[in-house]
Amino acid sequence: MFQVDKISTKLNGLVGLRDSFNPDYAILDADNQISRSGYYVTDNAYVKLEYIKDSQDYKGISDANFNLYLKRLQNSSIVNVCHRVFSRFDYLDRNLLYTNAQNKVNQESLIDGFVGYRIEVSRDSDIAFEIKRVLLDFDTLGDFKLMLFNTSKQAPIFEKAITITDKTQEVVLDWKVDNSDITYKGDYYLGYVKTVTTPIPFKRDYMNSSIMSKITHLRIQKVQVKGHSTETLFNLNLEEGLSENIGINPDITVYEDYTDLIIQNEMLFARAVELELSIAILREQLNSLRTNSVQRDAEKQSLKILAEIEGTSGDSPLKLVGLRSLLIGEIKQISNEIDKIKRGYFNNGIRVSTIT
């Protein structure tokens, strides 16, 4: 699994297009001309900028929208390549922290300060988790802010204002922690600042109701920081254990996430993205060939484009390896290199780059 929005944003500009010498078609913006890898799809004779412009669906498209159209094609190509490489099963575990029966009768007694859970993530690479939702068990009404901290930042990486209106509630969060931002490993703290006005949770004092689930690759403990009153990360030296219930029951999914690996090794994907983008552009031409001054014979051009994509075989006098075959070979090579990275072999020319 990987985060599609982050991957398409971070890797856009990995390959580029060259602007035309024809002043009527010299319309590329600066972003579309960026190629951090040195690969340009317009170096292919069938992927000329004139062909792209004259075969897209809307004849009167503005230069701004044409550039947006090209960015979207590149984003789709980036995501498609990553899906081809990372097609394996990546789900590891999912559970509520508390699953045993709870008798909602007695009120809990909490000190003022931060109360919550410390979440330690396995040191294994590419382990991510998502807090999909929380179930809330409070006896009184009121408001508080649920926060998720990482030890690398003072401010919460996620936060949600919550209003308790019932003794049982569900709040959807969709908080994903994939190590692809400025946080990497460390510990995470999920909780809230308890004050005199904060809703009071129920006790978990019925049979096994206080037993927490074991969730693969995570170690979770209840903690408190007495007197902490701000919505910032506390002094870790002041952290203490906590036996009381805080009323928060998170639903956690653990999975393998390759977002950071992809971003930090973007050059590994450059050639495949160039091939995928070239195929995408040529397919756009096939689906929207307009008879014009550039393409006078659409049918003949279609056959040439098909040969460029799929290659030639059989009785053809000229054997041509198609872009699709090249892409399949590139995907296999990337997969092999990724396996080496996952096993800890950072050699064979693999370069780690930092995206700013």
Image (tube, grey):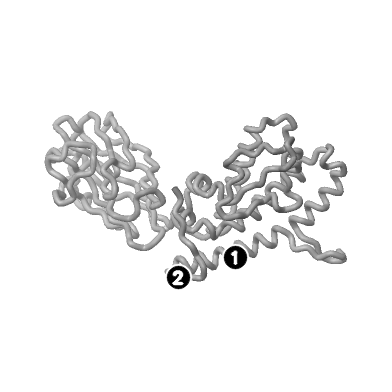
Image height of 312 relative to 306, above or below: below
Looking at the image, residue 331 lies above or below residue 105: below
Cα distance in 3D space between marks 2 and 1: 17 Å
Looking at the image, which is closer to me, 157 or 243? 157
Q: Which residue is mark 1?
A: 332
Q: Earlier in the sequence, mark 2 or mark 1?
A: 1
Q: Residues within 10 Å of mark 1 (few under 14, many from 20)?
A: few
Q: On residue 118, which mark appears?
A: none
Q: Residue at x 12, y 40 (%)?
A: 227
Instruction: Answer left or right for 173 relative to 293.
Output: left
- Residue 15, position as x, y percentages in the image: 60, 51
| Up/down of 181 relative to 88, above or below | above
Q: Which mark is residue 345?
A: 2
* Side of 193 relative to 356 (left or right): left
Q: How busy is the neighbourhood of tag 2: few (under 14 within 10 Å), some, or many (20 plus)?
A: few
Q: Secondary structure at mark 1?
A: helix
Q: Nearer the viewer, mark 2 or mark 1?
A: 2
Indicate the amino acid at tag 1: Lys
Q: In the displayed structure, does residue 343 sit left or right of residue 104?
A: right
Give the percent coordinates (x, y) of residue 289.
79, 41
Residue 226 in percent (x, y) is at 12, 43
Residue 297 image offset from top left, x and y in percent: 87, 44
The three-letter code of the residue at mark 2 reads Tyr
Q: Residue 333 or 89: which is nearer the viewer?
A: 333
User: What SS does tag 2 mark?
Assistant: loop
- Left or right side of 325 for 218: left
Image quarter of residue 165? top left
* Identity of the residue drawn at 24% across and 51% down: 118
| Residue drawn 36% across the image and 49% down it | 182
Considering depth in this image, is 149 or 55 the residue closer to the camera?
55
Residue drawn where x is 37% and y is 44% of the image: 175
